[in-house]
Amino acid sequence: MISGLPSREQAINLLRKNNCPPKVIRHCQVVSDLALEIAQKIQFNGFRVDLRLVEIGALLHDIGRSKTHLVDHGLLGGQIAKSEGLSRPVVNIIKRHVGGGITDQEAEQLGWPKDIYTPISLEEKIVSYADKLVDKSKRVPIDLEIERLQVEHKDAAERVRKLHEEMTALLGKEYDDLNIAH
């Protein structure tokens, strides 16, 4: 059991301990690297960001994929993180990263416990956004994710579009330095 915020190595070991497939661990590492890059650029632009929380939260965001690859991997991941003694901010990143967030109505339809499943803090939003910019272990344009969601879930596509607008406003001209094909 880890108390609070684990190191990068402890986080990766936690993914392994929970039997996350190697490709999921690789995805989490790429998302973490990108999320940290985004967070540093936003911090450079004058905003307060907990860089370590972003890095570790992003590393652990898909820990629930050790149990399922369905939408509730966020909910299950939050439960795993809580049972491992991780801090509330890390648990929140994990349970709020899916699809740019899950609304109260969607959570109720899914039969989830009453809670908040949309990213609120800047750190939660950065991790959710970085996750949408990584397909498997490759950085991809946000437009691809929005197009995919448009077919499957129009409301989620709109949430991701709004998240993109918010993040690009915070990043400003720094967005072009993220090495993501447009």
Image: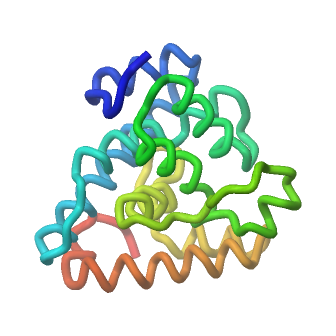
* Quadrant in the picture for residue 42: bottom left
As drawn, 83 above or below 56 = above
Q: Judge from the rendering whether residue 169 lies leftward or rightward of residue 78; answer left or right.
A: left
* Quadrant in the picture for residue 160: bottom right
Q: Position of residue 50 (x, y in %)?
A: 24, 54
As drawn, 148 above or below 14 = below
Look at 38% across and 69% down and name the residue there.
Answer: 181
Relative depth, front residue between 80 and 34: 80
Look at 22% across and 52% down and name the residue there.
Answer: 51
Q: Position of residue 148 (x, y in %)?
A: 68, 68
As drawn, 40 above or below 1 = below
Image quarter where the C terminus lies is bottom left
Image quarter where the N terminus lies is top left
* Quadrant in the picture for residue 21: top right
Look at 28% across and 29% down and name the residue there.
Answer: 8
Q: Position of residue 142 (x, y in %)?
A: 49, 71
Q: Judge from the rendering whether residue 85 lies leftward or rightward of residue 123; answer left or right.
A: right
As drawn, 58 above or below 169 = above
Q: Position of residue 164 (x, y in %)?
A: 45, 77
